[in-house]
Amino acid sequence: MTRLPDGTMREALIDTAAITENVRHLRRLTESEVIAIVKADGYGHGAVRSAIAALAGGATRLGVADISEAIALRRAGISAPILAWLHAPGASFAEAAALGIELGISSFAQLQAAASAASAERAVAVHLKAETGLGRNGIPPADLPVVFAEAARLERIGKLRVVGIFSHLSNTSDADDRAALARFTDALALAATHGLAPQLRHLAASHAAINLPEARFGCVRLGVTMYGLSPFADRTSADLGLRPAMTLRAAVAAVRRVSAGQGVSYGYTHRAAEETTLALVPLGYADGIPRAASGGAAVRVGGAVFPIAGRIAMDQFVVDVGDLPVAVGDEAVLFGDPTLGMPAVETWADAAGTINYEIVTRIGPRVPRREVAR
Ligand SMILES: *Cc1c(COP(=O)(O)O)cnc(C)c1O
């Protein structure tokens, strides 16, 4: 039986080689420049290590939501271009500009704030975000003429550099994404009439990068797929040629042989049907293991997969391992690479009524990440 190193209670193994390989594969597949999305601590995998691994796989740029995430990457020594696109109301762009961080611009006010962060030596690099139907941020169509005109003027006087024009899709249906694509194409044509000729145009995230080649524009923003997970309900990681980078595991913390009728965990939602062995796994909802998955998920112990018994608690849950001779310290794997026999993260997502993105991203700070490269 596999055991965890002494003293390790729980850990997420991050296969950085898988991230590198996934990016390499996706770059070939999409024939596009890759902006590697490492927001939310690299979807829970660690932003800095994920960024380094993605750049090693040929990504040329990085993307995050918040400026603070971009600053953290710079402070960690990462010099690749970084785009941040979600800003606090009234945020100052001075520090971002000084660190050469590129700003997603969703309004006239943000455009002015970006220009005011320019210095005599340095124009501020921006990507103008057009709203094309998602209903989140982005410059509304009615404002595009005035924002494009002002951006072109600010570029001419050396305050701004318009590096990109972008938008984001809803992945609702092929028809919806094509309608948004048409709005994006209109926005690009309008930008050209204002004299804007950005180096980059980017619309597709993972879903469209694979599914809608017309949305690639030679540059795609890849998040979930670079971590080896599928954005499609009907296609697995392996179907897409991807390798999941995160394996979540814990050391069995206690083992108990119980008789039929023994209640397990809060509320006794489970009672042992017959004499059996219960193994305690020290991961709970404080660590991002959804309590809602209590009924449906499974854990691999000693080469076989066993159901969760009773409710997932804050710090721990119980697995019914039947007559398996489990010992304290044995490995319990919650999810990993299914081609290696591990439960898929999607098993947990389905059990909790959510998506794979949310499961990996919410693995909490109490779970140490350890880099492995297979
Ligand atoms: C999160 C995000 C992405 C990455 O999406 P994936 O589906 O994970 O590839 C790309 N672009 C924007 C604007 C995002 O917010």
Image (spheres, grey):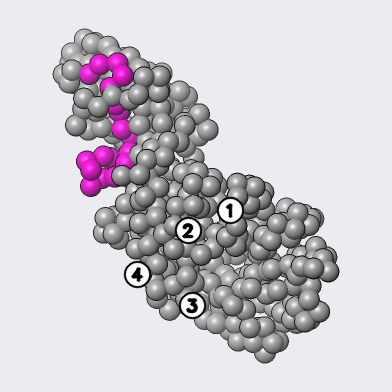
- Quarter holding the N terminus? top left
Q: Which residues are magenta?
A: 326-353
Pointer 4 residue: 29
Asked if residue 372 shows in the view, the reply is yes
The first of marks 4 and 1 along the sequence is 4
Question: Earlier along the polypeptide chain: callout 4 or callout 3?
Answer: 4
Query: Mark 1 is on which residue type?
Result: Ile
Is the residue under label 3 in contact with that under label 2 (CB below 8 Å)?
no
Examine the rendering and report whether any part of residue 290 can be seen.
Answer: no
Q: Are marks 1 and 2 in contact (CB under 8 Å)?
A: yes
| Marks 1 & 3, CB-CB < 8 Å contact | no
Q: Are marks 4 and 2 in contact (CB under 8 Å)?
A: no
Q: Is residue 79 left or right of residue 146?
A: left
Q: Secondary structure at mark 1?
A: loop
Q: Which residue is mark 3?
A: 217
Q: Nearer the viewer, mark 4 or mark 2?
A: 2
- Residue at label 2? 55
**Mark 3: secondary structure:** loop
Q: Which residue is mark 1?
A: 78
